[in-house]
Image: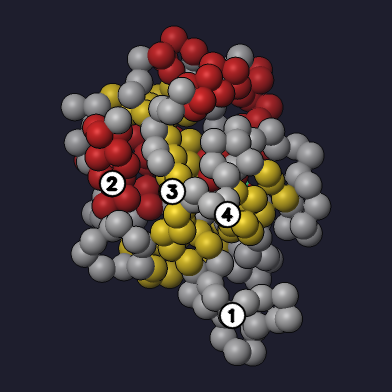
Amino acid sequence: QPVIGVLALQGGVAEHLSALERSGAHARPVRRPEELDAVHGLVLPGGESTAMTRLLTTFEMAEPLRCRLRSGMPVYGSCAGMVLLATSVLDDDGSASPAVSPFGALDVVVRRNAFGRQTESFEDDLDVAGIDGGPVHAVFIRAPWVDKVGADVEVLARSRPPTAAEVTASEDGLGRIVAVRQGPVLATSFHPELVQGDERVHRHFVETVRAG
Ligand code: GLN
């Protein structure tokens, strides 16, 4: 069984640990560089990407993690974790986000808190490429979306397209990009770890780790 860590500096750690255990992995919290050395793959959980940026520095984890990511360690980021994996991070108003230092493991521009105040939290059922067995129940909590993807990034899921009334001049009428993959790097805007009884996204990641 692969050993998969969950970065445990802040955020929704316990839910990922138990989803990974139910998905056929040995899961452990990772707070220190030695703990990072001992895992085959890592989950970056949801929480606050600004707080995680600070804590990564405090715990002297930013550099070790950057190295592992560069060497191709499989990683899955949900929500704030997606933000941390991006190449470039914007705040909801489109300005560069000064308080987040992303790892650049995923060639995407991510916009934090992008779904706006009215829909700070919402749920939907979305088709996700590579996940068989019907739509995935997706829980969004002050979620980011992906503004732009590089050529090597596969779009796995989009949010439900806006209705005609919601489409503004700046939108293309398609839903927002909320799940992506680039090789061993997987990211979702939403939180599959919060949906009990459906481990398909975590199983998919465990398979990626096993293959790597
Ligand atoms: N808004 C948070 C951030 O930008 C993410 C929220 C979450 O992880 N649920 O870091």
Secondary element under disc 2, as helix, strand or loop, is helix
Q: Which residue is mark 3?
A: 181
One can see residue 188 in this view: no
Q: Quadrant of the N terminus?
A: top left
Q: Is residue 9 above or below residue 134?
A: above
Q: CA distance from mark 1 to mark 4?
A: 17 Å
Front residue of 6/188: it is: 188
Residues at marks 2 and 1 touching, judged by CB atoms closer than 8 Å: no
Query: Is residue 120 visible to us here?
Result: yes
For the residues bearing labels 2 and 3, Cβ distance under 8 angstroms: no
Q: Residue at x 64, y 36 (%)?
A: 102
The kind of secondary structure element at disc 1 is: loop
| Nearer-N-terminus badge (3/4) | 4
Task: Point out the tag, 2 or 1, that comes first from the N-terminus.
Answer: 1
Disc 2 residue type?
His
Tell me where residue 205 appears, x and y as whole percent: 32, 42
Q: How many other residues sit within 10 Å of disc 1, few (<14), some (14-19) or many (≥20)?
A: some
Q: Nearer the viewer, mark 2 or mark 3?
A: 3
Q: Which mark is residue 33?
A: none
Residue at left offset 41%, top offset 27%: 73
The numbered mark at residue 173 is 1
Residue carrying label 2 = 204
